[in-house]
Image (cartoon, rainbow, N blue to C red):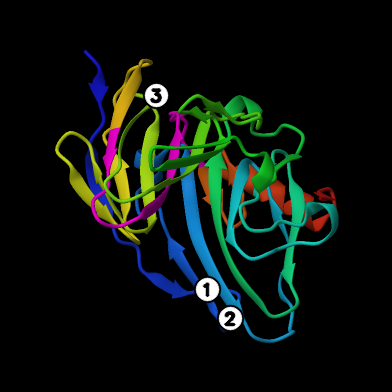
Amino acid sequence: MAIKRKLQQIDTPPAKPGFLGAGHLARAIIQRDFSESDPFILLMDDMLDKKDNSPAGGPHPHAGFETVTLVLEGEIGEGRHAMKTGDFQLMTAGSGIIHTETIEKPSKLRIMQLWLNLPKAQRWINPGLQELPFEEAPALEEDGLSIRVYSGSIAGLQSPIKNQTPLLLADISMKPFTNTVQQIPANYNTFLYVLEGSVNIGEDEKLLKAKEVGWLNLVGNDAFSELKLQTTEAATRFLLYAAKPLGEPIMSHGPFIADTAEEITQLYRDYRSGKMEHI
């Protein structure tokens, strides 16, 4: 008998003023303790409507985890690492890296940036960067359903991104009165974030609306599970995040993730002494 996934918890995170100043709103999507959201550490929905030419952002370090960035609107970065609407980037901070995100001109921008835990055995691997432009992300459109896969696999689509932590990230749109059943690993911690419209989830058809985050029940089983999705009169778009919990506690401080407080202290020493390279 197939394992059925169901909607277990709904969060409605508020948008609050962000650290970039005027025009920046940030919504913290993950409202759970890490022991429940594992391996997801945090996820921010950053919305920026910048009106002036003063620089915002700048160089900053990361270590011990991965940043997973999806641009929903606008452009960020320069040169070969510039990102536009629909582009994806996975940065493995690993042993430590300095990352620059500076916005100097008026911009309308919306990005989703996830902090994803690394397995303890890979926490201090060499830093790396993987990029997947919108045009190259595997996608399908059929029967009122549109899926674009940035990481992992779903609906017969496989992303070329190589993962340290098994991660599924898909951008899914459904036209009104569309039904689909998708398979996802039963033991993946899974949530949906609705960008527009609404979707009924599971056999009991619990409703998840725009700006809401819905966490599915977690089944400790290596088999695949079925996720039933249904829309009514509204066209709907949501992001699906799913990843396998690592079951490894973490120490978090500022831009660093580690296993012990001593490692956090050493990371700050490495950063201040110039040992971290700039990407």
**Residue range (magenta):** 228-250
Q: Residue at coordinates 65% horizontally, 32% vertically from top-left?
A: 161
Q: Which residue is mark 2?
A: 21
Disc 2 secondary structure class: loop
Q: CA distance from mark 1 to mark 2?
A: 6 Å
Q: Earlier in the sequence, mark 1 or mark 3?
A: 1
272 or 52: which is nearer to us? Answer: 52
Q: CA distance from mark 1 to mark 3?
A: 34 Å
Percent from the top left, x then y, of residue 228? 27, 34
Q: Are marks 1 and 2 in contact (CB under 8 Å)?
A: yes
Any part of residue 69 in sight: yes
Tell which of 152 and 20 is nearer to you. 152
Residue 107 % position (x, y): 66, 75
Q: CA distance from mark 3 to mark 2?
A: 40 Å
Q: Which residue is mark 3?
A: 185
Q: Amino acid at mark 2?
A: Gly
Q: Nearer the viewer, residue 231 or 122?
A: 231
> Which of the two labelled residues, at mark 3 and mark 2, occupies the earlier sequence position?
2
Which amino acid lies under the numbered mark 3 shown in the image of this protein? Pro
Question: In the rendered structure, which amino acid carries the disc numbered 1?
Answer: Gly
Magenta segment includes 217: no
Q: Nearer the viewer, mark 1 or mark 3?
A: 3
User: What element does badge 3 sit on?
Assistant: strand
Q: Residue furthest left?
A: 204
